[in-house]
């Protein structure tokens, strides 16, 4: 029989926030033990470091722009952003191939109900949405989810009716409870299962973390990353950092419960377990919070895979992009990869075989606020031609940005991520630069833009509205 799949990913959880990576002051004993038994991708990045775009890539194996996910599913835009049910998603393939499929936690791929009615029967507010049974669940049979709501201490969910389920527990704890119930229901089944668990913490609000977890960090003296400016190192920021680390500690405990269940029920050899995130968190680096920028803290995500006696533990340097998850997982499960996938399968690397794949990947971000969309429209321009695009390699981050509002100057940067790991001293590239290395990055980026029909305005094209 095919192996089972458990794919666990946390929202806004950066690569640096695992103790074994020796960067953030987190405590993650269960993750650290899992890493010792697993293959760790050191170069896994979020192609578009924002919730909906990465999740769309994860589900479809396509680039965010290819599936129309140029910002989060949210209210306030004329265009209703959502993952269209016509897309071929990993859940669809798994279901068609005889897997029982389940999804627990944050979805954030459906258009908010308040885009269509001010008083949804489900009670969904703001960016939230109840996704009813049917094609918009993209092949997932078992469903306990919500669209986008960040009340971690008082979460709500929907199953197969508009009636909210309000467990009164920290979201990650309740989602783990339900994941363990799901495993119990399917451990002796006649068909393999695939379960996706999407934890919302450590996503903000940072303060919504159970007190027992915060207690472990409340007196922690924060050791700031060198790229956090002095003016950002305030007592308030120290509290936020402690809260973020506490949430990661809580996620570690919940993840450990799932690992214990697999071990106690002899499921480690027939279950592929994946631990990852949708994007990172700046946490004051470069004076910024949150995500959606090209810095390491925002784009670099954990990616760890284990199937005992099949995947050899160790490190893997293969560059792994958001669209690569679906084809890689399907091939590891022995399933066909749809032609619709734009990502690359790295199953060979996972299994310790030689792989011919690019040593670079595409990065992108598009203006997504109603204000910026409107500002460009007034000039007869599409906002989708702006924002920033880039190329990431294990050694470098190359970025060109032409802004989120009209009139912003185009800028081009190259970061040496080996010799300047904090990305403090980028090379500022002049438009007439003829360095071979820069010309090659420009060529690679233009290839991606052409492949995706991305309308990004480049160099002299930009002058028309400045």
Image (spheres, rainbow, N blue to C red):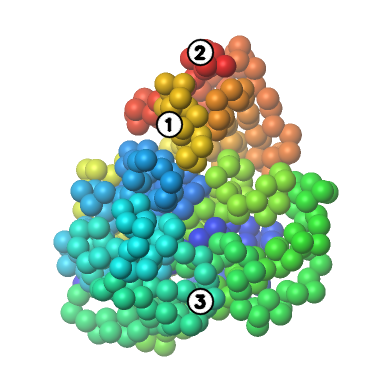
Q: Could you say whether the residue bearing mark 1 is in a helix, strand or loop?
A: helix
Q: Residues within 10 Å of mark 2 (few under 14, many from 20)?
A: few
Question: If you read the primary sequence from the N terminus, does the residue marked by circle 1 or circle 2 appear first?
Answer: 1
In the image, is 69 to the left or to the right of 375? left
Q: Could you say whether the residue bearing mark 2 is in a helix, strand or loop?
A: helix
**Residue at point 65%, 82% (across, down):** 212
Q: Quickly name the residue at label 3.
A: 154
Q: Where residue 174 appears, x then y in whole percent?
A: 45, 80
Measured along the vertical axis of the image, is residue 78 above or below residue 260? above
Question: If you read the primary sequence from the N terminus, does the residue marked by circle 3 or circle 1 appear first?
Answer: 3
Discs 3, 2 touching: Cβ within 8 Å: no
In the image, is 287 to the left or to the right of 262? right
Q: Nearer the viewer, residue 115 or 437?
A: 115
**Residue at point 77%, 61% (across, down):** 236
Q: Could you say whether the residue bearing mark 3 is in a helix, strand or loop?
A: loop
**Residue at point 67%, 55% (across, down):** 283
Task: Give the CA separation, mark 3 to mark 2.
Answer: 50 Å
Q: Quickly name the residue at label 2.
A: 464
Measured along the vertical axis of the image, is residue 328 above or below residue 319? below
Q: Nearer the viewer, residue 198 or 346?
A: 198
Measured along the vertical axis of the image, is residue 413 above or below residue 34? above
Q: Where residue 111 appears, x then y in whole percent?
A: 34, 53
Q: Quickly name the residue at label 1.
A: 384
In the image, is 417 to the left or to the right of 360? right
In the image, is 77 to the left or to the right of 299? left
Q: Where residue 183 appears, x then y in whole percent?
A: 33, 81
Which quadrant is home to the C terminus?
A: top right
Q: Residue furthest bottom?
A: 264
Q: Where residue 240 appears, x then y in whole percent?
A: 70, 63
């Amino acid at each position: 029989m095919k192996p089972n799949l458990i794919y666990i990913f946390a929202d806004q959880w950066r690569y640096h926030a695992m103790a074994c990576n020796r960067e953030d002051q987190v405590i993650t004993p269960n993750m650290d033990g899992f890493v010792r038994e697993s293959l760790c991708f050191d170069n896994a990045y979020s192609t578009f470091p924002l919730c909906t775009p990465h999740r769309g890539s994860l589900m479809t194996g396509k680039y965010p722009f290819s599936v129309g996910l140029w910002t989060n599913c949210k209210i306030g835009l004329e265009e209703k952003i959502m993952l269209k049910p016509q897309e071929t998603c990993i859940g669809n393939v798994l279901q068609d191939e005889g897997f029982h499929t389940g999804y627990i936690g944050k979805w954030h791929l459906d258009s908010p109900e308040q885009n269509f009615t001010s008083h949804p029967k489900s009670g969904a507010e703001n960016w939230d949405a109840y996704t009813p049974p049917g094609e918009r669940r993209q092949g997932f049979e078992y469903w306990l989810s919500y669209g986008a709501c960040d009340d971690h201490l008082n979460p709500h969910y929907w199953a197969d009716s508009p009636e909210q389920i309000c467990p009164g527990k920290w979201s990650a704890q309740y989602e783990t409870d339900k994941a363990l119930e799901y495993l119990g229901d399917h451990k002796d089944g006649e068909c393999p299962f695939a379960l996706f668990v999407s934890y919302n913490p450590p996503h903000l609000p940072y303060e919504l973390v159970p007190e027992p977890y915060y207690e472990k960090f409340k007196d922690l003296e924060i050791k700031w990353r060198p790229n956090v400016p002095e003016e950002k190192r305030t007592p308030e920021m120290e509290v936020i950092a402690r809260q973020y680390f506490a949430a990661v500690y809580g996620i570690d405990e919940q993840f450990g419960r799932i690992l214990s269940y697999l071990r106690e029920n002899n499921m480690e050899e027939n279950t592929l377990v994946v631990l990852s995130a949708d994007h990172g968190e700046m946490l004051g680096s470069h004076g910024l919070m949150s995500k959606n920028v090209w810095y390491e803290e925002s784009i670099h995500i954990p990616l760890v895979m284990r199937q005992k006696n099949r995947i050899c533990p160790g490190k893997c340097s293969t560059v792994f992009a958001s669209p690569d998850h679906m084809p890689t997982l399907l091939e590891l499960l022995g399933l066909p990869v749809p032609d619709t996938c734009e990502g690359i399968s790295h199953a060979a690397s996972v299994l310790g075989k030689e792989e011919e794949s690019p040593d670079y990947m595409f990065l992108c971000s598009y203006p997504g606020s109603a204000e910026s969309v409107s500002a460009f429209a007034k000039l007869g321009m599409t906002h989708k031609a702006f924002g920033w695009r880039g190329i990431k390699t294990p050694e470098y981050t190359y970025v060109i940005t032409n802004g989120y509002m009209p009139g912003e100057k185009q800028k081009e940067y190259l970061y040496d991520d080996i010799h300047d790991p904090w990305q403090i001293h980028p090379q500022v590239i002049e438009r007439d630069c003829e360095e071979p290395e820069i010309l090659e990055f420009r060529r690679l980026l233009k290839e991606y833009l052409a492949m995706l029909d991305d309308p990004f305005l480049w160099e002299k094209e930009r002058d028309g509205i400045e």
